[in-house]
Amino acid sequence: MTEHIQTASHWGVYSVETDRATHEIRGVDGVSYDPHPSPIQASLPETVHGRLRIDQPYVREGYLRSTGRRGADAYVPISWEEALDLVATALLETREKHGNESIYGGSYGWASAGRLHHSPSVLKRFLAHFGGYVDKTGNHSFGAAAGIMPYVVGRSDISNLVVPWPEVVEHTKLLVMFGGAPLKNAQIDSGGAVNHENPDWYAKTRAAGVDVVCISPYQHDVVETVAPRWIPIRPNTDTALMIGLAHTLVSERRHDLEFLHEHCEGFPEFERYLLGHDASWASRITGVPEETIIDLARQMASTRTLVNTAWAVQRADHGEQPVWMTVALAAVLGQIGLPGGGFSLGLGAVSGIALPRTTGIPRPKLPLDSNPVKATVPVARVTDLLLHPGEEIEHNGRVITFPDIELIYSAGGNPFHHNTNLNRFLGAWQRPATVIVHEPFWTPPAKHADIVLPATTTMERNDIGAAELSRFWIAMHQVVPPFQQARNDFDIFSELADRLGFGAEYHQNRDEMGWLRHMYDGARKQALEAGFDPPDFDTFWASDKYEFPADEGPTTLFADFRAGAALKTPSGRIELVSEKIRSFGYPDCPAHPAWLEPAEWLGGPLARRFPLHLLSHQPATRLHSQLDHASLSRQTKIRDREPIQLSVEDANDRGLVDGDVVRVFNDRGAFLAGVRICTTLMTGVVQIATGAWYDPAEPGVPGSLDKHGNPNVVTLDKGTSRLSQGSTAQTCLVEVEKYDDPPTVTAFELPVILRV
Ligand SMILES: Nc1nc2c(c(=O)[nH]1)N[C@H]1C(S)=C(S)[C@@H](COP(=O)(O)OP(=O)(O)OC[C@H]3O[C@@H](n4cnc5c(=O)[nH]c(N)nc54)[C@H](O)[C@@H]3O)O[C@H]1N2
Ligand SMILES: Nc1nc2c(c(=O)[nH]1)N[C@H]1C(S)=C(S)[C@@H](COP(=O)(O)OP(=O)(O)OC[C@H]3O[C@@H](n4cnc5c(=O)[nH]c(N)nc54)[C@H](O)[C@@H]3O)O[C@H]1N2
Ligand SMILES: [Mo]
């Protein structure tokens, strides 16, 4: 008999059709209240019971004898009893010999939707009760923006610094988008996208006659639906373009002096800097013609203009600057706090970011409990942490000393996806004595771990979906029993906590449904106090979802500030000059927004050897590395490799045709990819999606050729600046050459398993 059961993922809520007797998953369907369900959900039926699932616990063959190399060894199947003993022993020994500061539990990662079974969270709760762990700070998504914005506008909640679609449609006349807003990115949301409305909002934007400008190396970063005007720009030079625009505005007296004096700190000093950098200077740096800059500046001053900057633009060396300069440009225009005007960050970066939202909705949550260890590492500096114990780095006005890491515990992330400069990272990953990973699939982190514990996927457990950017609470029902010996991350930690003597503190004697009910009741109480009316747990669970009412209308960003309220900056105003930042004395983040040359870019000396700028964007057919093994993602590959886009000219110069395999390389490493020639990409720029599973020709050996197309084999791993230490993944020069007789891709093979 067929059953239909609702659950959810980061890419949407869906109903799963299963056979009640055999538990075969027959298909998935979007829910009726989702206007544009994501095609990514089609990858689920084949993967939940697919051959890459990890069926039971394993230990790396060389681990117990301290031999071999992570990534190169075979795996030995062990029982859960043995596996949990090994984990408990490693944890206890590490703590005893080296203290809790030697345990890295920062475990970055998107894992899966659901508020209880979010694996990095259950891991952190566990390690907190074990006496603590070294955590990470910041994120890969918008680390530089989150670092700089507290100084500029007194806020670090970057995903709220967005002008929502309804306001754009009603009030914006000119939408200037640095880095665009690729529609493919709006498929997903951390915690579970619900209503995919972005395509409809683009259509409304078009119908309202909003003039859209896409400033990006790639023309299709804004959907054709809105007939955008394309201004190609050299990667990592947006700050210079914004400075050129601001210069034009100021020198032609088109700026809003009253706004600058009333609401901003430091304009006179910033103006002196600005006046030395005109449109012709900006043109030389950006490759944008001087007249285009001047015309655009004039148009911006003549109408209601919104400047939006994509998160990708700040995922680059000195990524603080384009964000600060976005605010400065909007301040010069003087429309901050007016409906549909001013600035916005990351419009369209994820599904819910610019949809009508409701403020003050509480979320059911699992308490992480406080971490007794205070040592942390910025996410972009994890390799340095592992390689250089004792080293000091500057971060946001403080000095961090790296502790000596002996044990890595990772669940719910793929470090061979999110970290840059993987060859250096792989060397770092070999250093600690023990690496423990929970994974549902034989992914690169599983294949590089000492102890591998098999985790369930969302379909195998009950949970509650409640994304920060949505108005829904979603009941996620268990669809099928756990695969083979897989267990929920939460249950694994509960059992470990029992063994280690803090079970009662960790799980508080609640099982899965006990926790869901407890978490729901806590959030419901808060919701009732806030004037909402969610039903009791049983009604919610039976009815699949609760939808909070939409707000009457959005409040305009910074309208209260414009009307006189103070910002949480030292001056209470927008800081175009920050005395606080000046006091840090950082050469890579001065007291006002400025053009600082990136470590590598097309205008720098390295471009003579590596003349192509590599951009690695979010993938259309998967979430980061998740579901790369499903047919939807694999169908897009070229001769089994991730496609890399090259302009016609760059392809011709190298004698390349569509379908060729190429080697993409620089001094940090090399990977293979399949050529796709693109007529809408700027010459000098190549583009590849992130997320192809790392697949080294010589496993475990730093410097090996990656056969499959993982861009992080060549990306740079310096921090954006001493201020934020954010990721610089988009700052990367390479060369590309044809590669004959490429080796077979083995990313989707199982590791060698020694059955005794
Ligand atoms: N070059 C380059 N690199 C980038 C970026 C870029 O733009 N360019 N973007 C960066 C950004 S913004 C981000 S957010 C990061 C994302 O990096 P990650 O969040 O690390 O990427 P994911 O592929 O989502 O990794 C999630 C992992 O968790 C596993 N998993 C899923 N569900 C569960 C579960 O229930 N339990 C357990 N134990 N495991 C589970 C999946 O199989 C997968 O291996 O990448 C960053 N890396
Ligand atoms: N389908 C899907 N959607 C996703 C994700 C996914 O994995 N899959 N990941 C999600 C996550 S975690 C995040 S953080 C967001 C990220 O959202 P973003 O960071 O905004 O997304 P990207 O796709 O990395 O980049 C968007 C575009 O920026 C342009 N760009 C890159 N560098 C520059 C530059 O220097 N200047 C200019 N002007 N343009 C530049 C590129 O052409 C690229 O296509 O996406 C989310 N959405
Ligand atoms: Mo992200």
Image: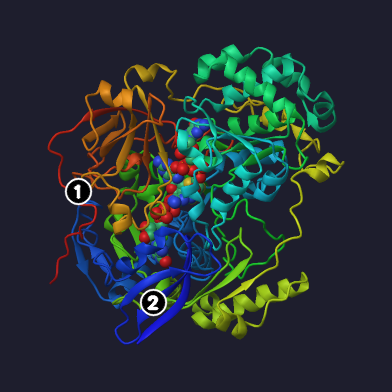
Mark 1 surroundings within 10 Å by alpha-carbon count, few (fewer than 14), some (14 through 19), many (20 or more): some
- Position of 648 with respect to 181 (left or right) is left
For badge 1, the amino acid type reads Val
Color encoding of the figure: rainbow
Task: Locate the N terminus by quadrant.
Answer: bottom left
- Whether residue 378 is visible here, answered yes or no, is no
- Whether residue 427 is visible here, answered yes or no, is yes
The x and y percentages for residue 299 are: 68, 25
Q: State which mark lies toward you, 1 or 2.
A: 2
Near-viewer residue (606 or 125): 606
Which disc is residue 364 wearing? Answer: none
Mark 2 surroundings within 10 Å by alpha-carbon count, few (fewer than 14), some (14 through 19), many (20 or more): many
Tell me if residue 76 comes above or below residue 330 in the rendering.
below
Which residue is at the far right?
Answer: 564
The x and y percentages for residue 553 are: 75, 56
Location of residue 261 (image quadrant): top right
Near-viewer residue (397 or 182): 182
Location of residue 733 (image quadrant): top left
Q: Is mark 2 within 8 Å of ligand 1?
A: no
- The residue where tag 1 is placed is 745
- The residue where tag 2 is placed is 17
- Position of 490 with respect to 71 (left or right) is right
Q: Earlier in the sequence, mark 1 or mark 2?
A: 2
The x and y percentages for residue 670 are: 26, 35
Near-viewer residue (473 or 197): 197
Q: Residue at x 25, y 39 (%)?
A: 674
The x and y percentages for residue 334 are: 77, 30
Tell me if residue 575 comes above or below residue 240 in the rendering.
below
